[in-house]
Image: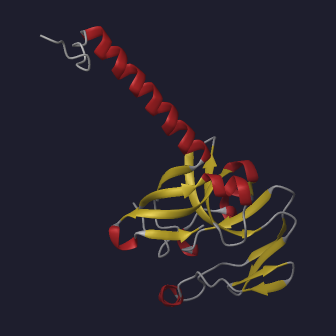
Amino acid sequence: MKRNTYAKEPETFLESVWDFIKTLMISMVIVFLVANFVARPIQVRGDSMYPTLESSSIGISNVLGRKMSGLKRFDIAIIYLKDKDEYLVKRVVGLPGETISYHGGTLYVNGEAVEEPFLDTWYRTQWGEPFMEDVEEITLEEGEYYCLGDNRPSSRDSRYYGPFYEEQIVAKGSFILYPFDQFGVKSW
């Protein structure tokens, strides 16, 4: 009788364990590379970006886009605070070299009023005045960004921490996976 040359010999226990360890190590390397160079998982904590992003929303952010195209005004930024081992989700309103201020709820960049179309008008009126406290002029240095939450009355942001440094901003944008009614790109 002819022996089937395609049949695999039964693996020993040690071979099975070694195969599992190799698969686990390869998976860990792939996850590390994707999370650090392509897309980072995020979970929104708190209401500082409401109503744009809800607390407990889960999604992914764009690490590769951040590294390739940099940051633009009104990008959603994922900021890592190393000393607190904490991530923040905020919106970039001021870029390096600009002078930023707020007066009467209006953003001024280099002395000129700039509209913030992402702010929800209905939500803003529910708060009444002031939705945004005045912020005295601050001139950003090279590599500094002024970032605020969309829910200005309930956000710890550059008004509290000061400008964020470029190396603290690890990703931008958000593709929300959950809750399902928010599914999709919020800002890249």
In the picture shown, does residue 115 fall above or below 159?
Answer: below
Q: In the depicted view, which residue is nearer to us: 186 or 163?
A: 186
Residue occupying the point 11% across, 10% down: 1
Q: In the depicted view, which residue is nearer to us: 63 or 109?
A: 63
Residue occupying the point 61% across, 52% down: 63
Q: Where's residue 28, x and y in %?
A: 47, 32
Residue occupying the point 69% across, 49% down: 168
Q: Where's residue 55, x and y in %?
A: 42, 64
In the picture shown, does residue 126 fall above or below 10?
Answer: below
Q: Is residue 95 rendered to the left or right of residue 170?
A: right
Q: Is residue 84 visible?
A: no
In the picture shown, does residue 30 fall above or below 106?
Answer: above
Q: Where's residue 107, x and y in %?
A: 73, 81
**Location of the C terminus (image quadrant):** bottom right
Which quarter of the figure has residue 78? bottom right
Q: Residue furthest left?
A: 1
Q: Is residue 14 visible?
A: yes
Residue occupying the point 87% across, 59% down: 141
Which quarter of the figure has residue 115? bottom right
Q: Is residue 106 rendered to the left or right of residue 47?
A: right
Q: Is residue 140 rendered to the left or right of residue 82?
A: right
Q: In the depicted view, which residue is nearer to us: 119 or 160?
A: 119
Q: Where's residue 140, x and y in %?
A: 84, 63
Tell how many labels.
0
In the picture shown, does residue 183 fall above or below 1?
Answer: below
Q: Residue furthest front?
A: 1
The scheme the figure's colours follow is secondary structure
